[in-house]
């Protein structure tokens, strides 16, 4: 029951934001009482914190599952394609509420989660350098920090959603440019071939097992 409450609450937070969602509204789809929720969580903030951990754990699991086998340039492209695709289903009010009403929790989660993602992404870039997919002069930490800045601007801003750009167009003209800039001639040729296959297939197939908001 705890996991059901967590997943349902997470979906509700992402769909409607945080501030206006009471405990009762969060679990309304489950048809349970707030008393049941308080058996597992002290309050709304406690529930929110665990829901955030669940959200990022799901993202990290996808990355971890495929990181070992995939071409590093393909992997970075696919990961950020999926991240942008998922962010299009998240109400930007969620990010604003988290930043404005729960700044300490936001920072706490960023520190915990950030270290895990940094380690994984830096490892992917390092592997790409070793395989002559990425250029040897690329600084993995700086490159990824730049990508994070771009992603946050995309995910937390209504501009791209309002203008109706496709995920592929957004990625290709933002984060995709950074990934391409990291590539050697060999890596770029290979990446372009992969991008063409993504276009022809209509999306990134390997990452389609993602959370769907109800």
Image: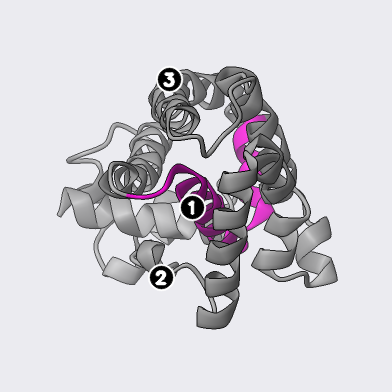
Q: How was this image coloured?
A: one colour
- Residue 90 part of the magenta segment: yes
Crowd band around label 3 with a 10 angstrom C-alpha radius: few (<14), some (14–19), many (20+): few
Q: Is residue 197 above or below residue 8?
A: below
Q: Is residue 148 left or right of residue 54?
A: right
Crowd band around label 2 with a 10 angstrom C-alpha radius: few (<14), some (14–19), many (20+): few
For residue 208, which numbered disc appears in the image?
A: none
Q: Tell how many labels.
A: 3
Position of the N terminus, as image quadrant, is bottom left
Q: Give the foreground label among 3 and 1.
A: 1
x, y percentage for residue 145? 64, 25
The secondary element bearing badge 1 is classed as helix
For residue 74, which numbered disc appears in the image?
A: 1
Q: CA distance from mark 2 to mark 1?
A: 12 Å
Residue tagged 2: 205
Q: Residue at x 57, y 19 (%)?
A: 141
The secondary element bearing badge 3 is classed as helix
Say if residue 96 shows up in the picture.
Answer: no
Q: CA distance from mark 3 to mark 2?
A: 27 Å
Q: Which range is magenta?
A: 70-99
Position of the C terminus, as image quadrant, is bottom left
Q: Give the quarter of the image for residue 161.
A: bottom right
Q: CA distance from mark 3 to mark 1?
A: 22 Å
For residue 115, which numbered disc appears in the image?
A: 3
- Of the two numbered discs 2 and 1 on the same chain, state the one appearing first in sequence: 1
């Amino acid at each position: 029951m705890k996991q059901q409450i967590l997943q349902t609450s997470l979906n509700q937070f992402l769909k409607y934001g945080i501030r206006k969602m009471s405990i009762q509204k969060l679990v309304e789809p489950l048809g349970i009482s707030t008393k049941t929720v308080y058996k597992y969580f002290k309050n709304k903030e406690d529930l929110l914190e665990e829901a955030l951990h669940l959200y990022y754990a799901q993202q990290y699991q996808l990355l971890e599952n495929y990181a070992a086998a995939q071409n590093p340039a393909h992997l970075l492209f696919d990961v950020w394609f999926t991240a942008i695709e998922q962010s299009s289903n998240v109400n930007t009010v969620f990010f604003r509420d988290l930043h404005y009403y729960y700044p300490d929790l936001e920072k706490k989660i960023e520190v915990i989660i950030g270290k895990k993602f940094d380690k994984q992404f830096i490892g992917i870039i390092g592997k790409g350098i070793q395989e002559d997919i990425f250029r040897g002069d690329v600084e993995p930490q700086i490159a990824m920090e730049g990508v994070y800045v771009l992603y946050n601007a995309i995910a937390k801003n209504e501009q791209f959603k309002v203008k109706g750009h496709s995920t592929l167009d957004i990625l290709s003209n933002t984060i995709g440019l950074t990934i391409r800039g990291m590539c050697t001639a060999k890596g770029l040729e290979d990446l372009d071939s992969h991008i063409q296959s993504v276009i022809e297939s209509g999306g990134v197939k390997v990452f389609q097992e993602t959370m769907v908001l109800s």
